[in-house]
Image (cartoon, rainbow, N blue to C red):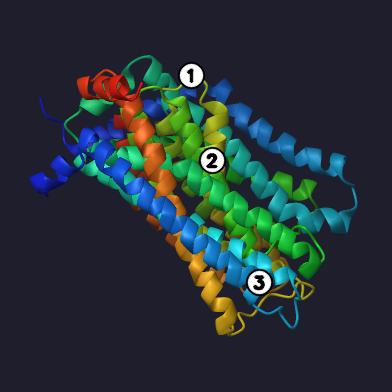
Amino acid sequence: MKLPAIVHKFSSPQNFYVMAGKLIPWLGWACLLFMISGLYYGLIEAPADYQQGESYRIMFIHVPSAWMSMFVYMVMAISGGIGLIWRIKLADVVASSSAPIGAAFTFLALATGSLWGKPMWGAWWVWDARLTSELILLFLYLGFIALQASIEDPRNAARAGAVLALVGVVNIPIIHYSVEWWSTLHQGPTVTKFDKPSIHISMLIPLLLMAVAFKFYYATSVLMRARNEVLLREQNSRWVKEVIANES
Amino acid sequence: METSLSRAFIALLKRDLQLAYRHRNELLNPLFFFILVVALFPLGTTPDKTLLMTMAPGVIWVAALLASMLSLDSLFRADYEDGTLEQILLSSHPLSVLVLAKIISHWLVTGFPMILLAPLLGIFMYLPTNGILTLMLTLVLGTPILSLVGAIGMALTVSLRRGGMLLSLLVLPLYIPVLIFSANAVDAHLADMAITGQIYILSSMLMLAITLAPVATSAALRISLE
């Protein structure tokens, strides 16, 4: 299957550099707007939980970052696949720029989960299915980053990473369900699992605001990283030299 | 002259087995490692019979994961260094099939002996006879998955000078489902519960790995040798 010429034209490094540069401020301001309103409604307006008191408020960071940890991996694998199949350089750049952000979201989800777990479960860590699969996801990210870091040629690094990310995508559901199955068998009833209570609207709105803010944050930071990466990879081309001459 | 695919497959399988036989001393190393890791656990914890028995399936399977991961190096490394791998890549036959031949021969000399060693390790860990039989069954289904999935990681890292630690980071997370279902099958059998579910899942994971892993491995090899 051939991609239409417009895709190639749009995804040329130079074009991307200019377009992304124009988009970044908009995305950044949108992120700030959503994050401030989300934090305001989440930390100030929303009532305390009748069971968990104030400590549930970490959810407004925890849940969006857990969502993002999966989302970014999918973006990484899909753009890696696009780079592998259609050899679009930009897709490679997006995949490798996404990995550290995704790993950071995963780490944030684990860290906030652990802070939340201490008052709720009485332990920093429990071998709960979702925690465990999140931990494994972190290792998948770290493997991807380490693999790309150890291959010198950026082209080959991108393609090797793409194969690994795609293998990971096939494996993530298997890992997820095997871990879920394992924890239901191994875990005693000591751990109170959150049965998803129907969440009240006053808590749902800040949660969704924060989720949107996190999406914008990711879009902003991935474009910023990708712009740097493009400059680095194209450092010998004429337009990069012009850009640098203009900016310095 | 064009050889048929099946003849090329068998020729490659034979060649790899013959090479493995000529270096048979090296084949013993992962097996000694397998035994040694299991033997460390009673020394590190307690020789208590019931405690060791409850840990047995997990400990033996973790040791199997580590041993099979360490043995992956012999899958492509020597062929990469002497240029054979490049010749295989140039062949007109589909690379994924040829890769499968290499993986099968690798499993025959590393995974298969581990199955034969399982009773000894079961005795080390006080596993009763029915537990040992289930352990062997899970090894029969599980070790080929380890070789197949490991081949992808090995193919990605074969051209790197220090691929060893990286390989473990890439491969071990992917091994987790095999560990979970295999160790759990043995546990469940010891508790007199049905294990058909676990066996079916392991079998289907094996089928999935046989179908997809050679394709991913050959894609990875082409990238590594570019």
Residue A208 screen position, x and y as percent = 49, 71
Tell me, for residue A142, which label it has, or none. Answer: 2
Residue B153 shown left or right of residue B60 in the figure: left
Looking at the picture, which amino acid does disc 1 mark? Arg
- Judge the density around disc 2: few (<14), some (14-19), many (≥20) Cα neighbours within 10 Å: some
Q: Secondary structure at mark 3?
A: helix
Secondary element at image label 1: loop
Q: Let me know if residue B143 appears in the view.
A: no
Residue at (32, 16) in percent of width and height = B83
Q: Given the image, on which type of amino acid does mark 2 rest?
A: Leu
**What crowding class fits label 3: few (fewer than 14 Cα within 10 Å), some (14-19), or many (20 or more)?**
few
Disc 3 chain ID: A
Q: CA distance from mark 3 to mark 1?
A: 54 Å
As rendered, which of B162 and A113 lies closer to the eye?
Answer: A113
Residue B154 image offset from top left, x and y in percent: 45, 33
The label number, if any, that marks residue A44 in the structure image: 3
Circle 3 or circle 1, nearest the eye: 3
Q: Quadrant of residue A139?
A: top right
Element assignment for label 2: helix
The chain under label 2 reads A
Check if mark 1's residue and mark 2's residue have beta carbons within 8 Å: no
Q: Name which residue lies at 48% across and 26% down.
A: B74
**The one of B103 and B140 positioned closer to us in this rendering:** B103
Counting from the top left corner in percent of width and height, residue A17 is at 28, 36
Distance Cα–Cα, label 1 vs label 2: 19 Å
Q: Which residue is mark 1?
A: B161
